[in-house]
Amino acid sequence: MSRGRDVSSRHALLEWNGADWLVRDLGSRNGTSLDGRRLDVGAQAVVVAGARLVFGREDEAWVLDDAAPPRLMAVEVNADRQRIAEGGYLVLPGPDAPEHAVYRADGAWVTEQQGSVRPVEDREILVLADGVPWRLHLPDAEPGTWQDDPSALALGRLRLQLAYSRDEEYVEAVARCGDQHLDLGARAHHYLLLLLARRRLADQAARMPEGEQGWIRQDELLEMLRTTDNHIYIMIHRARTALAGHGVADAAGLVERRSKTRQLRLGLGQIELRVLDRG
């Protein structure tokens, strides 16, 4: 937006309060109008989708196209590229080459890098291996929990169904939430989910406490999968991203990590396994 002569340098503020977008005139010389009504200095008004804002006496009106809450995102510094999170899960530079995974855990924003998790702050810059810096933009307001919305897609409501061939070369995954069916397809990273699911089901059968169920050391997984740490990270991020792409809240919790250990587990307890007739 280019600033006209009758638009003050600090003219108005548009902000999210956790429920609505609000506009407030900051004592501008020529005022702010919302849908043709001039706002009193310091007064706040709710801005809904389709609302028209005019700053000063400019002829140009600004329309709020989308009144959805702010989303987790990252913008490449000094460039136009941006990444917007799906399901509250952001991977930089992308799921095929994950270096940072940013998500909310225990009420705080964190980044996971090579299995290590640490807190991050709004507008913090993450520098990737190629030297490219990305600036994080973290929503201020605490998002509503999935318990507040009975229709929300959330990890705690999902039942994960894994079907695999007898030689285990083919694994397909489906997540169900009530009548909703989330087809996650047949992917190589589903074999990791299969191994984690088996461990969690075995611990459930042994009546272990929920908090102790399913944990497995990454070194053990390396032997079982005959792969590398980096490949496991890629499989984890692809599985989370697939779930987040369906709009599942807290998709990062699909695979959980224990702090300061190399242990991980499947983050949901409702699991079904079956062998396919084929293969």
Image (tube, rainbow, N blue to C red):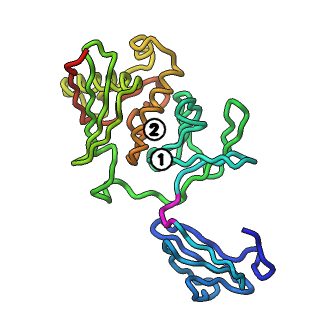
- From the image, tell me which residue sits under label 2: 241
Left or right of 249, for residue 100: right
What is the quadrant of residue 127 in the picture?
top right
Q: Which quarter shows the C terminus?
A: top left
For image coordinates 47% across by 25% down, the residue present is: 261
What is the quadrant of residue 118 in the picture?
top right
Q: Main secondary structure of the magenta part?
A: loop
Q: Which residues are magenta?
A: 66-70
**Disc 1, disc 2: CB below 8 Å?**
yes
- Separation of disc 1 and disc 2 at Cα? 8 Å
Q: What's under tag 1, amino acid-wise?
A: Glu
For image coordinates 53% across by 38% down, the residue present is: 101
Q: What's under tag 2, amino acid-wise?
A: Thr
Front-most of residues 20 and 104: 20
The percent coordinates of residue 142 (x first, y second) are 47, 58
The percent coordinates of residue 268 (x first, y second) are 31, 36
Q: Give SS at disc 1.
A: loop
- Residue 57's place in the image compared with 275, above or below, is below
* Numbered tag placed on residue 86 in the rendering: 1
For marks 1 and 2 on the same chain, the one whose residue lies earlier in the sequence: 1
Q: Is residue 109 magenta?
A: no
- Residue 69's place in the image compared with 42, above or below, is above
Q: Which quarter shows the N terminus?
A: bottom right
Crowd band around label 1 with a 10 angstrom C-alpha radius: few (<14), some (14–19), many (20+)? many
For image coordinates 42% across by 33% down, the residue present is: 239
* Numbered tag placed on residue 69 in the rendering: none
Q: Give SS at disc 2.
A: helix
- Residue 255's place in the image compared with 227, above or below, is below
